[in-house]
Amino acid sequence: MKVILKEDISNLGYKDDVVEVKDGYGRNYLIPQKKAVIASESAMKMLAENQKQRAHKLAKIKADAEAVAETLKDVTLTIGAKTSSTGTIFGSVNNIQIAEALEKLGHNIDRKLIFVKDQIKEVGSYKAIIKLHKEVQVEIPFEVVSE
């Protein structure tokens, strides 16, 4: 089943993307939650017309995302965490701590845009990906140290 997404859905696509999903996922989750509509011929024509009208606005949004990415490309973070004597963290470091560390440096990034691959439960160096736009993402190195 082909659907047109009405909002960004991680691991599926971005707003206004036409994606192929399983019938049950589309009918039972995406469409009732108003996260997608069926990609009928008329819906595709409306999508094309809307994208044509918003092309200038989308170019500005992408340019803004690239400007933010340019300021973030040289940033390295140090995040302090309480650890045991073996170097294991009590709890874990997640995107909330990374967003707070970026905010201390003057970069206001929404925590929902920050992705960390694995759970961070030990002291060491890691990388986080910040997805600012569907075509613009920045990889931020950060180090977890013991407090």
Image: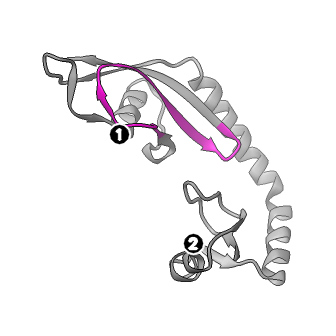
Q: Which residue is mark 1?
A: 96
Q: Residue at 59% across / 59% down in the picture? A: 8
Colouring used for the render? one colour
Residues packed near mark 2 inside 10 Å, few (<14), some (14 to 19) or many (20 plus) = some
Left or right of residue 45, residue 91 in this image: left
Residue in the foreground of this view, choosing between 82 and 103: 82
Q: Which residues are magenta?
A: 115-136
Coordinates of residue 127 in the picture (x, y in percent): 48, 26
Residue 88 within the magenta-colored segment of the rendering: no
- Gap in Å between the C-alphas at discs 1 and 2? 25 Å
* The disc label shown at residue 43, or none: none
Q: Residue at 70% across / 46% down in the picture? A: 61
Left or right of residue 40, residue 95 in this image: left
SS for callout 2:
loop
Name which quarter of the figure residue 37 lies in. Answer: bottom right
Residue 124 within the magenta-colored segment of the rendering: yes
Q: Which residue is mark 2?
A: 35
Residues packed near mark 1 inside 10 Å, few (<14), some (14 to 19) or many (20 plus) = few
Identify the image quadrant of the N terminus: bottom right
Name which quarter of the figure residue 69 lies in. Answer: top right
Residue in the foreground of this view, choosing between 54 and 46: 46
Q: In terms of secondary structure, what is the magenta stretch mainly?
A: strand
Q: Is residue 5 above or below residue 14?
A: below
Among the two numbered marks 1 and 2 on one chain, the one whose residue lies closer to the N terminus:
2
Q: Is residue 103 above or below residue 87?
A: below
User: Residue type at mark 2?
Assistant: Lys
User: Residue type at mark 1?
Assistant: Ile
Q: Residue at 86% across / 62% down in the picture? A: 52
Coordinates of residue 55 in the picture (x, y in percent): 82, 55
